[in-house]
């Protein structure tokens, strides 16, 4: 394994191979790997925080990966360095992951200014990888100007990604009437930008109509910031149209956050939420691995399933077991 100095030097110099190895290190659950990873992140912290962080979400089939391939290529042509953290859905049965994003982003995969990292979600809430936040920091330390986080778009993932990025971009399809019914109000309150994708060919008129309908719908939704009203634009990843306008809006949103002081405050709150989420995860892990809990859990679960006791009573008994163990 590389030493800390090797990792730091390689990442700062933009070595993509070493960056990839560092991400693998922070994704590892081995205790010794985690110790090295945290020391590495601490060393790199002064070099982080300069990238534009954008979360990209949308229903399956909206074309997120194809869009990112087009948008990423547009940005690298402007000589920006781009990282795409693509979160793949892991199998709930085998824990496997398709990890096929590089095949769906063919141009970016060959672009020296781009870095694509597919990561399995490993069953974490909302399909967002547990270590994505730390991966963002590594990419920033490596000098990437823009970091896109592509979610699986499964409902809760929008909430998770909003806690780690500056801007949340929602991709939608031209069939506004049907899709509006399926979009939860809470999700619309999280987004900062909306783009109607696949606005090309015989779908162009429908996309423009959808754009107006989404704008009308957003008027009844509380925006994520009082200093910003989410715009709605049309884009075509196929024809590469609308990308410049969308990027202008992303930059305008970032400027609005910086000018109002909301950007730094948002990131401060995100860091605190990150800390507490890790605490909660660790406490729950310790709870579930407690020998007393492991022994009592199957019987209590069976009683809950059979309707013999309430879930509240079962939870109370489990918590009493841990309190008894501490007193003992």
Image (cartoon, rainbow, N blue to C red):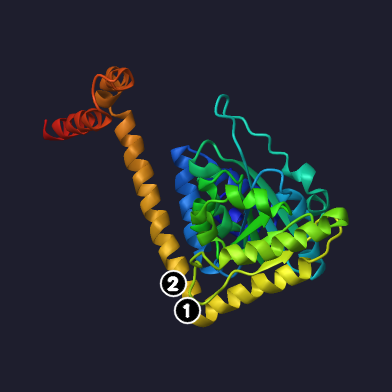
Tell me the element at label 1: loop
Number of numbered tags placed on the structure image: 2
Name the residue tied to disc 2.
Answer: 265
Horizontal and vertical percent for residue 81? 72, 64
Q: Quadrant of residue 309?
A: top left
Name the residue tied to disc 1.
Answer: 261
For the residues marked 2 and 1, what is the alpha-carbon distance in whole angstroms?
7 Å
Q: Residue at x 49, y 71 (%)?
A: 225
| Image position of 317 (left or right of 8) | left
Tell me if label 2 and label 1 are in contact, CB under 8 Å: yes
Residue furthest to the left in view is 327
The quadrant of the rendering that contains the N terminus is top right
Q: Residue at x 47, y 45 (%)?
A: 34
- Looking at the image, is 35 positioned above or below residue 226? above
Q: Quadrant of residue 198?
A: bottom right
The quadrant of the rendering that contains the C terminus is top left
The local crowd at label 2, few if under 14, some if 14 to 19, many if 20 or more residues have their Cα within 10 Å, is few
- Looking at the image, is 219 positioned above or below residue 170? below
Residue 213 appears in view: yes
């Amino acid at each position: 394994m590389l030493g800390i100095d090797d990792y730091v030097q390689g990442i700062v110099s933009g070595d993509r191979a070493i960056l990839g190895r560092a991400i693998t290190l922070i994704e590892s659950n081995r205790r010794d790997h985690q110790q090295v990873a945290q020391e590495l992140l601490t060393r790199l912290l002064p070099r982080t925080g300069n990238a534009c962080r954008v979360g990209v979400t949308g229903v399956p089939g909206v074309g997120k990966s194809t869009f990112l391939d087009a948008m990423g290529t547009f940005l690298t042509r402007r000589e920006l360095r781009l990282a795409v953290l693509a979160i793949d859905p892991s199998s709930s049965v085998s824990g496997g992951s398709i990890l096929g994003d590089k095949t769906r982003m063919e141009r970016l995969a060959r672009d020296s200014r781009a870095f694509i990292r597919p990561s399995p979600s490993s069953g974490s809430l909302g399909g967002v990888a547990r270590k994505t936040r730390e991966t963002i920091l590594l990419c920033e330390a490596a000098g990437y100007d823009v970091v896109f986080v592509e979610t699986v778009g499964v409902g809760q993932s929008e909430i998770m990604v909003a806690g780690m990025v500056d801007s949340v971009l929602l991709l939608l399809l031209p069939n506004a009437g049907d899709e509006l019914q399926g979009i939860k109000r809470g999700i619309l309150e999280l987004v900062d930008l909306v783009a109607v994708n696949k606005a090309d060919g015989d779908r162009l008129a429908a996309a423009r109509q959808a754009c107006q309908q989404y704008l009308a719908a957003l008027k009844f939704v509380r925006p994520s910031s009082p200093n910003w009203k989410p715009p709605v634009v049309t884009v075509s990843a196929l024809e590469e149209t609308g990308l410049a306008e969308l990027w202008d809006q992303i930059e305008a949103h970032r400027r609005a956050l910086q000018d109002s002081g909301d950007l730094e405050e948002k990131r401060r709150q995100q860091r605190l939420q990150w800390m507490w989420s890790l605490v909660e995860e660790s406490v729950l892990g310790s709870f579930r691995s407690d020998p007393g809990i492991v022994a009592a859990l199957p019987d209590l679960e069976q009683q809950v399933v059979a309707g013999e006791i309430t879930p509240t009573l079962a939870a109370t008994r489990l918590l009493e077991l841990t309190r008894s163990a501490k007193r003992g």
